[in-house]
Amino acid sequence: MKKLNFLNECREIIYKNIEIFRAIENYDKTNRLSKAFYRERINFTIDNKLLDKFKKYCQDHGYNMSRLIEKHIKEELKLN
């Protein structure tokens, strides 16, 4: 039974990190390591005053604006 649990845990790890395993598989074929995670540029509209305050806040605290927005989106979607 231990062997079955081990195999199930391995499968779960692979499915949770499929992008990384695909990048490794691609490296095996091409000898070039591609990015496992890509970021995408998006456009959206927000209030100008809010944007100014957000930029200043991030600058004063040393935050990357994109990473902070990404963090809050993940929290909203309960991904962390």
Image (spheres, rainbow, N blue to C red):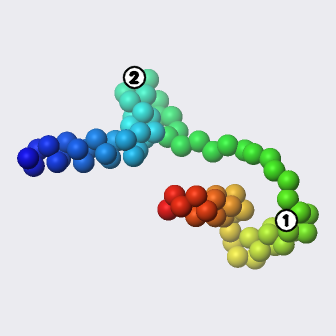
Amino acid type at image mark 1: Leu
The location of residue 72, given as percent across then percent down, is 64, 64
77 in relation to 35, above or below: below
| Residue 24, horizontal then vertical, whole percent | 39, 35
Task: Determine the residue located farthest toward the right in the rendered image.
Answer: 48
Which quadrant of the structure image shows residue 41? top right
Neighbours of disc 1 within 10 Å: few (<14), some (14-19), many (20+) = few
Residue name at image x 47 percent, y 30 percent: 32
**Label 2: how many Cα within 10 Å (few below 14, some 14–19, many 20+):** few
Can you say whether 29 is above or below 24 in the image?
above
| Residue at numbered disc 2 | 29
- Tag 1–tag 2 contact (CB < 8 Å): no
- Residue 74 in sight from this viewpoint: no
Q: Work out whether 42 lies above or below 67.
A: above
Q: Quadrant of residue 8?
A: top left
Label for residue 51?
1
Looking at the image, which is closer to me, 21 or 10?
10
- Give me the C-alpha separation between circle 1 and circle 2: 45 Å
Q: Residue at x 44, y 35 (%)?
A: 23
* Of the image marks 1 and 2, the number of the one nearer the N terminus: 2
Residue type, numbered disc 2: Lys
